[in-house]
Amino acid sequence: MTLLGTLGVAVIGAGRMGADHVRRINDVISGARVAAVVDIDRARAEAAAYGIEGCAAFADPAAAMAAPDVDAVLVASPGPAHEAALLAAFERDLPVLCEKPLTPDPASALRVLAAEQRLGRRRVQVGFMRRYDADYLKLKRLVDERAFGRTLMLHNKHRNAGTPPGFTDAMMIHDSAVHEIDVTRWLLDEEITAVRVLRPTPSGAAPEGLGDPQLILFETAGGRVVDTELFVNCGFGYQVTCEAVGERGTARIGDEHGVFTNADGRWGTGIAPGFVERFAEAYDRQVQRWVDATRRGAVEGPSCWDGYAAAAVCEAGVRAQATGERVAVDLVERPELYR
């Protein structure tokens, strides 16, 4: 049953991701409108809101959430600001689409988890957009249907053309590998229990002090092993692949995303310059699904538990980077609300 007409959304954060979501809600999807844009830099919020009828600019998230035409919140601010925004949304019982990370660490994620449990129902969908990518959805169906028997291993590649100034080893885990962490948990439907990080000789293109590339190994509760190559200064574009290895066959996505061509001695497909371009349709589908569910009075997709579990694995991954050892993932018992 539809509970709302057009959904009035407050977008928190007017940086690259926030501005892209403002455009997406305003120009691409249906059933929602941008009612407010919030940024600590009010001028940037005003710039993002400019030209959108009925859209107000704010510097304070709580003030935007109190506006009478705001029905839901999309959080796209930096990770350290997420907890405060989520708790403010809970106070008004507003549904939220929160870009990853839920919060930057397990302790703060647990506080959000506890606050949502006190409401007695889910309010948050976490923005792990790969779950909405057409290729990943096809792979998920094959894994769930056991098209090639039980899945035994996953092989992932995650390559970026380059990194911004100040990119650190820890960000290799928190900003890049976090997507493979969620994909692993989602595809295999089980938790990651341990992490190892192998560090080959760094590329000459890597900034000083950054260990790039790295190979991350995950162990899961069901005894599966998952490897992820992280190469974030590869120089040639943005490339993501995932291969599921089953008992009777394999399935791989990402090698031929887009149109395959032959011309003038060249063959192959184009390589996306960045993640926004590669996963543009996934972002569109994710936001549309969130809007549709919210208008029905429902919450779907990745939960606060998924955000917490990813943060816990990231914490173990950073320790594994620093020590070179196998590090076990420390998870609390999964609450009933998220089972």
Image (tube, helix red, strand yellow):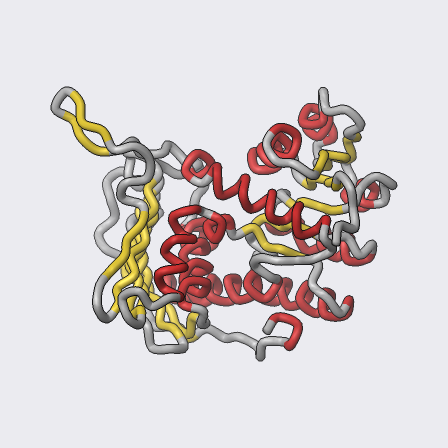
Residue 236, relative to residue 153: is it above or below? Answer: above
Left or right: 30 in relation to 169: right
Identify the residue at image location x=30%, y=41%. 206
Identify the residue at image location x=37%, y=32%. 273
In the rendered image, the quadrant that contains the N terminus is bottom right
Residue 185, relative to residue 157: is it above or below? Answer: below
Q: Nearer the viewer, residue 161 or 121?
A: 121
Left or right: 287 in relation to 37: left
**Residue 149 percent location from the top left of the image:** 28, 70
Left or right: 221 in relation to 57: left
| Quarter of the view holding residue 300 | bottom right
**Residue 301 percent location from the top left of the image:** 58, 57
**Residue 132 percent location from the top left of the image:** 49, 49
Identify the residue at image location x=29%, y=50%. 213
Left or right: 227 in relation to 180: left
**Residue 317 percent location from the top left of the image:** 41, 63
Identify the residue at image location x=33%, y=71%. 325
